[in-house]
Amino acid sequence: MLGLSKASFKPKFSYYEVEWLLDRREEKKIENTVVYNLVRKLTDKAVPSYEDKYDKKWFNFYLPLKRSGYFISLPFWIVEYNKEFFIGFQGLGNLHIKKGRERIEKEYKTVFKEALKIISLIKKTKNKILEKTIPYDIRTGKIKGKYIMEKFMSEREKRKILGYYC
């Protein structure tokens, strides 16, 4: 695998353990300065994908996980607003992190330590590790019809079909 042995990087969590830590239905709030500082350290290692006078957004972070015996990379994004972090894990849930003294499970700290660790592997492999470890069912995006369709739909047909739904 890209000149790396399986022993060179072993994720500490399974996909299902992280799924258990997060709640798909409701944002989990954490008021813990140690976790906050780990997220800050993570964002300091990257250039924001978007920034204005109110917030900063980073869209390309990854959490190494095990799923069905394989090493996968789960994409997640971070938004900083009003000196608080809002983090979304692809398909698993969201965290809202701010400074505080709340006692939390150590797994939340480990999640961000793992995300920090994989950055060096991504750099070492020049992003090739991500091509191999982001599962197809997690990837998002749109394929333009011109790349897969032999014949395009006319505007009239399009309006007619949309009329059934609107």
Image: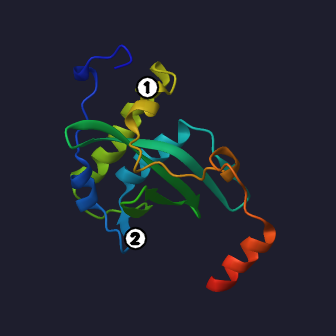
- Front-most of residues 35 and 9: 9
Task: Using the image, determine if residue 70 lies above or below residue 4.
Answer: below
Q: Position of residue 57 (x, y in %)?
A: 60, 53
- Callout 1 amino acid: Ser
Is residue 99 rendered to the left or right of residue 67?
A: right
- Front-most of residues 42 and 71: 71
Instruction: Work out which quarter of the rendered image holds the C terminus and state it.
Output: bottom right
Q: Residue furthest top?
A: 3
Q: Residues within 10 Å of mark 1 (few under 14, many from 20)?
A: few
Q: Position of residue 107 (x, y in %)?
A: 24, 51
Task: Using the image, determine if residue 49 lies above or below residue 96.
Answer: above
Q: Residue at x 47, y 41 (%)?
A: 42
Q: Residue furthest front?
A: 151
Q: Residue at x 72, y 79 (%)?
A: 160
The label on residue 120 is 1
Is residue 76 rendered to the left or right of residue 13?
A: right
- Front-most of residues 128 and 116: 128
Residue with the mark numbered 2: 27
- Callout 2 amino acid: Glu
Task: Using the image, determine if residue 125 lies above or below residue 92.
Answer: above
Question: Secondary structure beneath disc 2?
Answer: loop
Q: Position of residue 130 (x, y in %)?
A: 45, 33
Q: Residue at x 36, y 60 (%)?
A: 92
Q: Position of residue 85 (x, y in %)?
A: 50, 59
Question: Secondary structure beneath disc 1?
Answer: helix
| Precedes in sequence: disc 2 or disc 1 | 2
Task: Using the image, determine if residue 153 lies above or below residue 126.
Answer: below
- Front-most of residues 137 and 42: 137
